Amino acid sequence: MKFRPCIDLHNGSVKQIVGGTLTDQNNPKVNFFSENNPSFFAKMFADYNLQGGHIIKLGANNDEAAKEAIKAWPKGLQIGGGITIDSAKKWLDLGASKVIITSCIFKKNNLDIKKLKKIVEKVGRENITLDLSCRKKEGKYFVVTDKWQTFTNLEVEKKSLQMLSEFCSEFLIHSVDVEGLMSGIDINLINIVKDSPLQCVYAGGVHSFEDLDIIKEIGKDKIDVTIGSALDIYGGNLNFKEIVNYFNQKS
């Protein structure tokens, strides 16, 4: 199990946002606003060699900030948020380690396999992470798009993970309903993705070392972890260096 750091960008700044409040009104609930620029965090993560973390562009006006972070650590960070079939190669050429894909492979809330195949042809399966950000509806988890506000018809379950594994190298699983709340992890979702044929990165609600112990036990080292708002570097209570040491000791 590895620690995958994140840099969330909103209007060009590093912020931590409550996931479910990210709407088109551009006035989400913000847990943390950093006075440090994106490159500050990218260099910090590089110093600890925290490979495979991600930059997420939350809405418009984030391209320059994302480029700054990538330039600070070429091939060290993945990039997601509004990535399209046409822009994916550009971000890889700029130095992103992988592109994180979600909304562009959906059409009228249905998965568009043709688009998915097209992006694989353009950049290669090994360069793609599929972001299966999901919310719970009627006891099941469905992928959400459009700043996590629109439910698609794609359920996150064993069969869909198996099918999608042919088109990417890993999954990023945001539990949107607990994202940014620091209220605990979504154990039900973790129990679903534990059977993924590919490595998964779980994000959402981590707020204690006990949460990490649970993910490690359930995931049996096949589920890596992202921590955002709970980290002290983002205004939370978990010490960043202690988190890094935890993962180094558990690896």
Image (cartoon, rainbow, N blue to C red):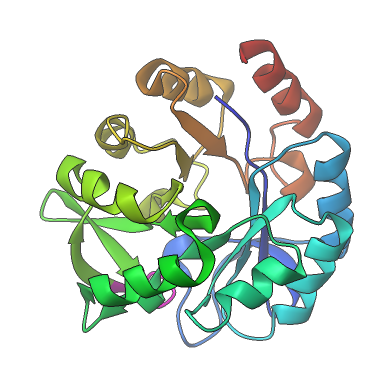
Q: Position of residue 63 (x, y in %)?
A: 71, 80
Give the image location of residue 183, x and y in percent. Answer: 46, 40
Q: Give the tally of numbered discs.
A: 0
Q: In which quarter of the image is residue 3?
A: top right
- On screen, 142 above or below 153? above
Which of these two is toward me, 46 or 237? 46
Residue ID at (31%, 37%): 193
The image shows residue 129 at horizontal and vertical percentages of 48, 55
Quadrant of the image containing the N terminus: top right
Q: Residue at x 46, y 41 (%)?
A: 202
Q: Can residue 149 be seen in this view?
A: no
Residue 174: x and y, percent?
A: 43, 51
Question: Taking 49 as reference, is 2 left or right?
Answer: left
Q: Does the magenta stretch include residue 149?
A: yes
Residue reaching furthest to the front: 121
Residue at the outermost left position: 138
- Left or right, 111 with reference to 71: left
Determine whether 143 is above or below 249 in the image.
below
Screen quadrant of the C terminus: top right
Is residue 163 left or right of 26 when viewed as pictured? left
Query: Camera-side residue: 184 or 119?
Result: 119
Give whichever of 56, 198 is nearer the camera: 198
Q: What stretch is highlighted in magenta?
A: 146-150
Residue 207 visible in the shown view = yes
